[in-house]
Amino acid sequence: MAANINPTVRRRRLGAELRRLRLASGLESTEVAERLMVSQPKISHLENGNRAISPRDVRDLCEIYQVTDQQVIDSLMQMAKESGQQGGWHTYGDIPQSAYVALETDATSLRTYAPMAIPELLQTPAYAHAVIGETIPRLTAEQADTRLKVRMRRQHRIYDPARPLRLWVVLDESALHRIVGSPDVMREQLEHLNALGTEPHITVQVLPHTVGAHPGLSG
């Protein structure tokens, strides 16, 4: 699979385009399901990008929606082929929040508020290892190791010289005071955070305790 192909993103883009075509044709999803002889939930899953779609189904849908532009049909069918491929995360098995990870990989920018801990994209290996081991019960050593590898690989987007992820993080002061792992682990983490904050594409801000109650208290 080409390195720039993200199956999750392809599915969502294709689903959005198929929904647009359906609405333009004036058809309800139930009508489309009846013509394709499938269930209505399947049409919803396809349009929401929750499942891959075969090129044949795309061709049939284009016929139902009266799409005659062959270039459009070929483009949609190509997206269908790519959406059925396995993403780069498949080698790690069934990882939590895999859809989010795939979207994050394809993103150009990300904004996040972290009330309790340092965000995963900014964690050192030692800090991440401590968080994983101390917050997720009943993990085997192998599962913990896989999660750590996935977390460290996600950080590659920050250092990608071709298209570094523009990251804006707002940290609650609590995340800086909470000792995770050990004082030495925390010291290394804070030094790492301070260094990352000097990068032009990374913004790290701290919301101090003195601000009192604020909308972020609800998470």
Image: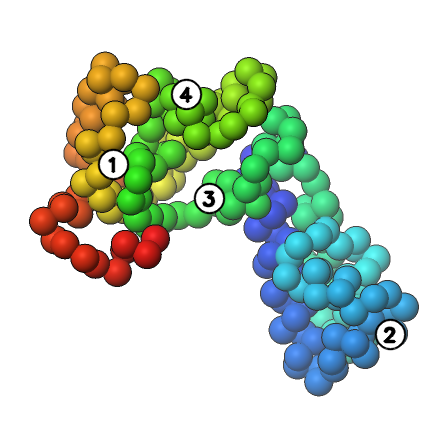
Q: To which residue does mark 2 refer?
A: 34
Q: Are marks 2 and 3 in contact (CB under 8 Å)?
A: no
Badge 4 or badge 3: first in the primary sequence: 3
- Give the SS element for disc 3: helix
Q: Residues within 10 Å of mark 3 (few under 14, many from 20)?
A: some
Tell us which disc is closer to us: 4 or 3: 4
Label number found at residue 185: none
Residue highlighted by disc 3: 104
Q: In the rendering, which numbered label is found on residue 175?
A: 1
Q: Amino acid at mark 1?
A: Ala
For the question of whether residue 71 can be seen, the reply is no
- Vertical placement of 182 versus 70: above or below? above
Q: Find the distance from the CA under tag 1 to the CA under tag 2.
A: 53 Å
Alpha carbons under labels 2 and 4: distance apart: 51 Å
Q: Which one is in front, 79 or 84? A: 84
Q: Position of residue 87 (x, y in %)?
A: 62, 37
The answer to which of 131 and 97 lies nearer the viewer is: 131
Identify the residue position indicated by label 4 in the image.
Answer: 129
Q: Disc 4 residue type?
A: His
Q: Residue furthest left?
A: 210
- In the rendered view, tell whether residue 167 sits above or below residue 158: below
Q: Which residue is located at x 79 percent, y 53 percent?
A: 54
* 88 left or right, relative to 71: left
Q: Residues within 10 Å of mark 1 (few under 14, many from 20)?
A: some
Front in this rendered view, residue 66 or 16: 16
* Residue drawn at 24 percent across, 43 percent down: 171
- Between residues 211 and 169, which one lies in front from this camera angle? 211
User: Percent position (x, y) of residue 47?
Assistant: 67, 64
